[in-house]
Image (cartoon, coloured by chain):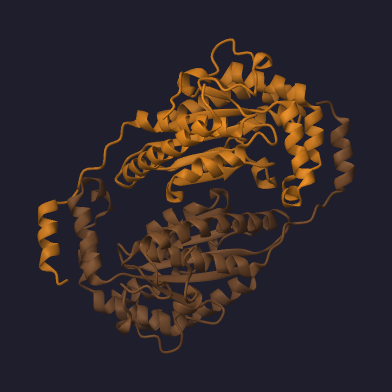
Chain colours: A orange, B brown
């Protein structure tokens, strides 16, 4: 079976000096093989992901405190939903806690912007998935000046401090920015307008957002510069090939789970005594 | 591809005079073919389930009010978790809302027993799954006399009225009782005691519950007699063959979704005008 030449964890990490303007959304860092080989690799990885997720779940059920949080960001059509369906869909739904963060409700607007995020953090033993996140508070909010600069400017540091607290509490954070090119986005929007089974995914507002592309690039660059920390680094995933993005994120998730190095929880009862009790019962 | 001889909806429905004592948990009503053929049928059904679930989701996103609720009941080891993993796992996790109802918390005990159930109902566009449910309030509660008879006795009627209200609100309810034989349960408990990767699923209390088997049979019989209504019938699914139970429930779910007869939502925008706007944008 074909293998990664460089692990996505190395190949996709946004380190110091990462330049989004020079990034190619149609590239496939670390993967020199075909799409078919990539799909086979994702399927195989899925089996292992399922085992690791079950260990995490078992750990949570027996007093463990670990969890994993996958944060998904990206422009419209970048494929966040497809990641949930095709990567997260590989593991047992019982072990997944999924949250979508849309425009804040009135109640949410009355709270601190991180409150709804805290409320949505995964509980022990679970893989949490954020479809959009607190990063919207320095992306759409910054681009559209929904609050003044002196309010959003301190948020980068606040977010770093918040995430540190979450990580210290036992949650591994995997932050993924899915990057689609303007041309590919155009093609995907066109598909939504040409296929009646996709109309429901189309929103005329998406075209207005598209005109703000350079402002969003700038806002993403600031996010990557200022919040790709040691405790919660960003991975920038080229998303023009959906299959590449899926396999890369499947691998990032798997590595995060492998790092937890969880065995199966030991019995908290006397195994032999229980077997004897069971044997003593009728059929 | 092999087919059902009788639809599970017909073959498994608990109608008037259903006798649990005469029910065979190792039977496979409506399916005359092999396990391999059954697994192929479930996989194929899964593709269709995925499509139907997406239509339901699209409907919910565009103002629809429909949802589907799968209620799973059964003795320990009957395979409720496996249904979630292998049947619900076939559809997009974004469209699923899963709730597990364990022993009520202190807060829950202070509320009406149906309150936590109401709070957990699926929102429009979703498939809700209850792993245990309000039926525990006439099963474990009745068997162990956790409340006096004059309290649990009226609950059958209360539950029927509650479910009627839920159905009238647009939610299709599919109630499934997974029936495992005492011998098969014994074998499954033994496996949990013999395999260290399964210790975490074992609870010494399970053996105490096993000694109450006849009382639970009686309580299940009362549930089937009194709450298998026109608006929310029960399906009794033999669960000694896990693959049979999974394919049967996959089919019940599919039929419930087919009945909604949902098309794709029409565009709520001017498609041609949007295409023109898109074309006018750079790349």
* Residue A224 position (above or below residue B121): above
**In this orientation, does residue B102 appear?**
no
Whether residue B158 is visible here, answered yes or no, is yes
Give percent across and percent down for residue A39.
Answer: 51, 36
Seen in the image, is B64 located left or right of residue B116?
right
Left or right side of A147 for B205: left
Question: Could you say which quadrant of the image residue B272 lies in?
Answer: top right
Which quadrant is the C terminus of chain B positioned in? top right
Query: Percent position (x, y) of residue A261?
Result: 31, 31
- x and y percentages locating residue A100 in the rendered image: 60, 43
Side (left or right) of B269 relative to B247: right
Nearer to me, B109 or B76: B76
Quarter residue B150 falls in: bottom left
Q: Nearer the viewer, residue A169 or A19?
A: A19
Q: Nearer the viewer, residue B145 or A188?
A: A188
Residue B73: image location, x then y, percent: 40, 68
Q: Residue furthest top?
A: A17
- Residue that appears at 30% across and 64% down: B76
Res B187 quadrant in image? bottom left
Q: Is residue B53 above or below residue B151?
A: above
Going 53% across and 45% down the picture, which residue do you hit?
A: A98
Name the residue located 56 percent from the left edge and 26 percent from the top edge.
A159
């Amino acid at each position: 079976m074909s293998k990664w030449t460089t692990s996505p964890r190395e190949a996709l990490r946004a380190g110091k000096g990462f330049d989004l303007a020079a990034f190619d959304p149609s590239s496939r860092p670390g993967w020199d093989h075909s799409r078919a080989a990539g799909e086979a690799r994702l399927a195989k990885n899925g089996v292992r992901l399922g085992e690791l997720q079950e260990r995490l779940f078992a750990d949570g059920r027996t007093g463990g405190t670990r969890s994993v949080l996958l944060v998904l960001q990206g422009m419209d059509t970048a494929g966040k939903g497809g990641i949930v369906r095709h990567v997260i869909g590989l593991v047992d739904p019982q072990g997944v806690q999924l949250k979508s963060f849309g425009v804040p409700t009135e109640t949410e607007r009355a709270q601190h912007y991180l409150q709804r995020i805290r409320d949505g953090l995964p509980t022990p033993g679970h893989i949490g998935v954020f479809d959009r996140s607190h990063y919207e508070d320095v992306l759409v909010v910054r681009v559209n000046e929904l609050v003044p600069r002196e309010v959003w400017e301190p948020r980068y540091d606040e977010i770093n401090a918040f995430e540190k607290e979450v990580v210290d509490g036992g949650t591994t954070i995997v932050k993924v920015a899915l990057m689609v090119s303007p041309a590919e986005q155009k093609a995907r929007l066109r598909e939504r307008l040409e296929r009646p089974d996709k109309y429901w995914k189309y929103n005329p507002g998406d075209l207005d957002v598209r005109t703000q592309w350079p402002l969003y690039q700038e806002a993403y660059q600031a996010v990557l510069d200022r919040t790709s920390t040691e405790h919660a680094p960003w991975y920038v995933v080229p998303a023009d090939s959906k299959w590449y993005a899926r396999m890369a994120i499947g691998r990032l998730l798997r590595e995060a789970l492998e790092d937890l190095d969880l065995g199966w929880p030991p019995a908290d009862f006397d195994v032999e005594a229980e077997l004897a009790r069971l044997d003593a019962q009728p059929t």
